[in-house]
Amino acid sequence: ETGVTQSPTHLIKTRGQQVTLRCSSQSGHNTVSWYQQALGQGPQFIFQYYREEENGRGNFPPRFSGLQFPNYSSELNVNALELDDSALYLCASSLDGQRENTEAFFGQGTRLTVV
Amino acid sequence: SQQGEEDPQALSIQEGENATMNCSYKTSINNLQWYRQNSGRGLVHLILIRSNEREKHSGRLRVTLDTSKKSSSLLITASRAADTASYFCATGPRQLTFGSGTQLTVLP
């Protein structure tokens, strides 16, 4: 158990809809990162939040957006869902996003299926 | 784009044997981390090795890092059926860049 919890665990949405995924970070961690993992691939970095501010973004379109709250939990929002958005979405919590060499601890993921 | 690439893509061994997986990366790194993933679930952190370290141990795991060759290896000794999983290397320092993983199958 990493102490990182994600909800929901599974979700089915229709193309064009919007979705919100949630993540509670490990106690004492102020940094949350989101990753998308397509079937058979490694996770791809979406973005990171450090103390409620975006602290880096991967190669994802603006319809992927996020938020971090004062308690350091986080949301990932995806608008105008496309079939290719079907994937496992992983949240990772780390102690301090400004430090190097910090370990990232992952939640169990949310499996999103877009039909 | 994928920074790290694991080799082999798939590995099948008998219980009790050792398993070695390799990772190559392209640019300079501050650290390299290894993760395990069981069947589409979350990633479990195994070990972090810093760029100034050459070898690190954790239980049955041994990780080496060769920054001159931009490569790392993960050795699992005395493998068990429960070690069956996908193994990924990831490079930092902050946002992680993952390879495509090695699928390890340990046969009882």
Image (cartoon, coloured by chain):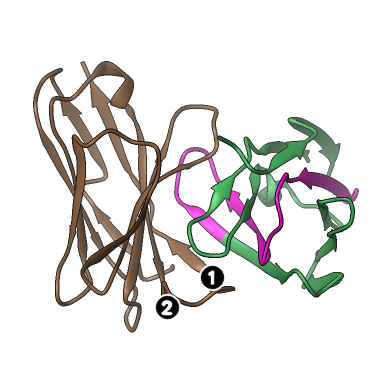
Chain colours: A brown, B green
- Asked if residue A26 can be seen in this view, the reply is yes
Q: Is residue B102 left or right of residue A20?
A: right
Q: Which residue is mark 2?
A: A95
Residue A90 location (% of width, % of height): 37, 48
Q: Quadrant of residue A69?
A: bottom left
Q: Which residue is mark 1?
A: A103
Q: Residue furthest left?
A: A17
Relative height, residue B40 to residue B73 (above, below):
above
Using a 10 Å C-alpha cutoff, classify the residue at mark 2 as few (fewer than 14 neighbours), some (14 to 19) or many (20 or more): some
User: Which of the pair B106/A57 is nearer the observer?
Assistant: A57
The residue shown at (13%, 32%) is A79
**Cβ–Cβ under 8 Å for marks 2 and 1:** yes
Gap between marks 2 and 1 measured at Cα: 8 Å
SS label for mark 2: loop
User: Which of the pair A27/A72 is nearer the observer?
Assistant: A72
Q: Is residue B89 left or right of residue A54?
A: right
Q: In the rendered image, which quarter contains the N terminus of chain A?
A: bottom left
The residue shown at (55%, 35%) is B1
Start-end of magenta stretch:
B16-44
Relative height, residue A31 to residue B3 (above, below):
below
The label number, if any, that marks residue A29 in the structure image? none
Residue B55 location (% of width, % of height): 86, 70
In the image, residue B18 lies in the stretch drawn in magenta:
yes
User: Which of the pair A61/B86 is nearer the observer?
Assistant: A61
Residue A33 location (% of width, % of height): 36, 58
In the image, residue A113 lies in the stretch drawn in magenta:
no
